[in-house]
Image (cartoon, rainbow, N blue to C red):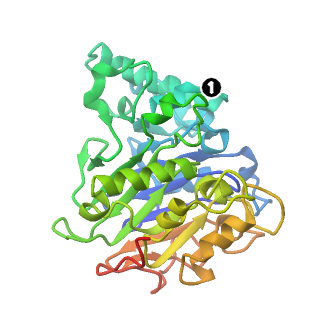
């Protein structure tokens, strides 16, 4: 099992989809979305990376059983939860069986659940995630003795429209709050700043699932007493320009952009697979000033990662060619824009991996998931903001 000594972020090549793995120095693993296709298991097809095998090779085992510490589903679209039902264990962790292990089912010690996922049912994988979350929440509602066992743990992100879990507010984290405990372990050099979803999305008549994505900033420090961050990484699911307008307004209103550097970033995963919706509703409309301002918080040496199929000059959206052009204006060079579908080469894509060093995120470039680091690409502990708009 290959696990980096440094913290690490791995962006999997899943074409128009999302799946990222954060691994901390103590080997805590945080999976953000999943996109696991059976086709990726075909050893003869190098264009479809076997993300399940890589995941099993990258996580920890307890009594021989694979587990991740935290699973975060940003929202319930199929391209963010594909394969969940068949690859992750759902149910009482005490009943995890030899057959479950043989089938490669991964235990989720803790889940992060946005009740807004339940607002719109769209697919079996989303429903399976929701049902598992509700099973865990029910343990808390009836104060079951097993509610805090690994495999039963859960954190509520944001709000629920019908206030079904109002009495479980002790499990809830709201926008503007910082999480430092993951799978019941307090971290001193890693935290997450929650940006969205907002209560306002519950009142929207459309209740758009993309705009209600969980958006967060992953924050790494070299030492517990450090006053700056060695890496800040933004994850936003399919969040659109309306969400980012709210993020900027609220973050600045509460001065979290200054006090907590909550808008800064070294790594920015382009929302909705490099769609134009981050910038505006249609490509005929100019980019929103707030979306452009969000990108102005890039720190020195920052990267943008497009988790999408290959971006070409056509009418597709996502990914959108003009969206890529807008992103390129905000970073130092075209080499700082990475498209998961073509790294390191289109015929055989592999995960884009960053080790989090004291000098910032350092990309691995030897076309393997466990190779040597480059010496470039980090923002450094003394990084400065290029612009705040």
**Badge 1 element:** loop
Residue at figure coordinates x 25%, y 62% from the top left: 189
In the displayed orientation, state which residue is furthest to the right: 314
Q: Position of residue 306 (x, y in %)?
A: 62, 63
Q: Position of residue 91 (x, y in %)?
A: 47, 24
Residue at figure coordinates x 39%, y 25% from the top left: 94
Residue at figure coordinates x 78%, y 69% from the top left: 347
Eyeballing the image, is 148 above or below 292? above
**In terms of image quadrants, where is residue 283?**
bottom right
In this rendering, position of residue 145 left or right of residue 164? left
Q: Position of residue 51 (x, y in %)?
A: 62, 54
Q: Nearer the viewer, residue 332 or 203?
A: 203
In this rendering, position of residue 7 left or right of residue 214? left
Do we see residue 147 in this rendering?
A: no
Q: Position of residue 236 (x, y in %)?
A: 51, 52
Rendered-image quadrant of the C terminus = bottom left
Q: Residues within 10 Å of mark 1 (few under 14, many from 20)?
A: some
In this rendering, position of residue 146 left or right of residue 266? left
In this rendering, position of residue 169 left or right of residue 204? left
The residue tagged 1 is 121
Residue at figure coordinates x 80%, y 60% from the top left: 44
In the displayed orientation, state which residue is furthest to the left: 225
Do we see residue 196 in this rendering?
A: yes
């Amino acid at each position: 099992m290959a696990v980096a000594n440094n913290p690490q972020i791995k962006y999997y090549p899943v074409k128009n989809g999302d799946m990222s793995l954060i691994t901390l120095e103590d080997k805590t693993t945080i999976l953000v979305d999943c996109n696991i296709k059976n086709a990726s298991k075909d050893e003869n097809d190098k264009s479809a990376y076997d993300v399940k095998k890589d995941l099993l090779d990258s996580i920890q085992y307890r009594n021989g059983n694979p587990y991740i510490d935290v699973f975060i589903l940003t929202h319930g679209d199929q391209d963010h939860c594909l394969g969940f039902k068949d690859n992750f264990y759902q149910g009482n962790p005490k009943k995890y069986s030899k057959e479950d292990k043989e089938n490669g089912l991964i235990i989720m010690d803790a889940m992060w659940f946005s009740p807004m996922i339940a607002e719109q049912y769209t697919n079996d994988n989303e429903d399976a995630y929701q049902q598992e979350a509700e099973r865990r929440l029910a343990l808390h509602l009836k104060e079951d003795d097993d509610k805090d066992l690994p495999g039963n743990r859960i954190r509520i992100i944001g709000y629920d429209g019908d206030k079904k879990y109002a009495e479980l507010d002790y499990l809830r984290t709201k926008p503007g709050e910082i999480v430092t405990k993951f799978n019941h372990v307090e971290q001193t050099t890693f935290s997450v700043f929650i940006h969205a979803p907002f209560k306002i999305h519950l009142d929207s008549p459309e209740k758009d699932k993309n705009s209600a994505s969980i958006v967060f900033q992953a924050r790494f420090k070299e030492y517990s007493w450090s006053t700056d961050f060695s890496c800040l990484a933004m994850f936003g699911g399919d969040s659109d320009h309306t969400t980012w307008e709210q993020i900027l307004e609220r973050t600045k209103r509460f001065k979290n952009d200054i006090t907590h550097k909550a808008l800064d970033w070294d790594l920015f995963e382009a929302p909705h697979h490099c769609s134009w919706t981050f910038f505006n509703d249609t490509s005929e409309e100019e980019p929103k000033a707030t979306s452009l301002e969000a990108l102005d918080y890039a720190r020195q040496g920052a990267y943008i990662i497009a988790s999408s199929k290959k971006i070409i000059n056509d009418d597709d959206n996502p990914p959108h060619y003009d969206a890529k052009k807008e992103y390129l204006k905000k970073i130092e060079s075209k080499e700082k824009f990475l498209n998961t579908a073509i790294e390191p080469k289109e015929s055989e894509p592999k995960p884009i991996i960053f080790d989090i060093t004291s000098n910032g995120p350092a990309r691995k470039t030897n076309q393997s998931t466990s190779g040597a680091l480059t010496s470039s690409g980090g923002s450094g502990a003394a990084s400065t903001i290029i612009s705040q708009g």
